[in-house]
Image (tube, rainbow, N blue to C red):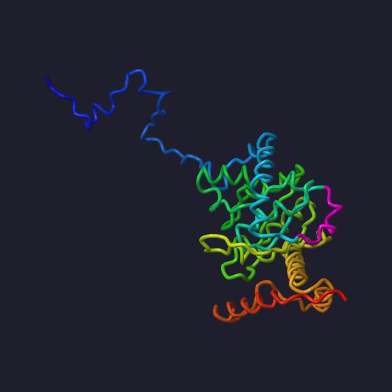
Amino acid sequence: MSIRNPSSRRYALSIPQRLRGFPFTKPTRPGSIAYEADRSTLGAEYDTAWARRPGARVARTAISIAILRPLVTALANPTINGLDRIAHIDGPAIFTPNHHSHIDTMLMLTAIPKELRKKTVVAAGADYFFDTRTKAAAAALVLGAIPIERRKVSRHSAYLAQSLLDDGWSVVIFPEGGRSPDGWGQDWKPGAAFLALRTSAPIIPVHIEGTDRVYPKGARRPRRDSTTVTFGHPIRPVDGEDARRLGARVERAVNELGDESATDWWSARRRAATATTPSLTGPTGVDGWRRAWARTAKNKARETPKRAWP
């Protein structure tokens, strides 16, 4: 009597004949015919529509109340300024904060006024947050994230964001495209300005200060510190303005909000009037060591108590 070898191909494929073909297995394809590659369902192609349905929105609200808000309060202890500047906004808007940390997203989702927050999505890097099915589902459900291509122009990403704005959803876009590697700002991309021109939605400049101390890029674990979120006045396109000029105007507004956060409103407005507002990108034309020293000096200056009015 022969004994069947468990490692043999015959034993491994000992499946009932009726279960070996289609539809129990994938259909066969003739080898002589060229087929297009299967379309990816991850990255920029990940479908997030399910995360904007009523059940998912209720779950996201519960997660925000039970987890995100207490976590942000414990780690970042945020101070929110400028809410009076956007109190009259009752429709979709484009929020454009600077970007230093993963904490920025959670901070924005707790700082945006409740009525706008109910229908707000976050533009997230398709290559980072949507590279695996688990991360994609978590980002879409917990953060309301939508995939955006950061390294190339994508019609699908632009159309998705535009269609959501047209449907009454606000969008949080980080124009820098990624977290700062050294605590200074990076060059801005024109995506937010392009969407504003296409949809007529107002752009709300936002400056976030302090998250680079809480959880900077490359850190293994966060640490507790205080942060400040400052909202600016809404900015709308003017006749004849293109995406480049509108984007530059929004970037200047965020620089002015950063100056206001570092000093006070009156001093920041005086510098803005004379076009001497310091840039968030820091010193240019110098090596990395000098930028690091300048960043250290800037942090120490922020620790100096501000003079009380008057």
Give the total number of marks visible in the rendering.
0
**Apparent side of residue 214 relative to residue 241 in the rendered image (left or right):** left
| Residue 26 location, quadrant | top left
**Magenta residues?**
80-90
**Looking at the picture, how far across and down is residue 14, in whole percent?**
28, 23
* Viewer-side residue, 175 vs 90: 90
* Viewer-side residue, 38 vs 278: 278
Q: Residue at x 80, y 55 (%)?
A: 202
Q: Quadrant of the N terminus?
A: top left
| Residue 179 location, quadrant | bottom right
* Viewer-side residue, 88 vs 293: 293
**Apparent side of residue 129 relative to residue 188 in the rendered image (left or right):** left
**Apparent side of residue 131 relative to residue 120 in the rendered image (left or right):** left
Residue 179 sits inside the magenta stretch? no
Position above or below: 118 against 200: above
Residue 83 sits inside the magenta stretch? yes
Q: In the displayed image of the protein, which residue is found farthest to the top?
A: 18
Q: In the displayed image of the protein, which residue is found farthest to the left?
A: 1
Q: Quadrant of the C terminus?
A: bottom right
**Apparent side of residue 309 relative to residue 65 in the rendered image (left or right):** right
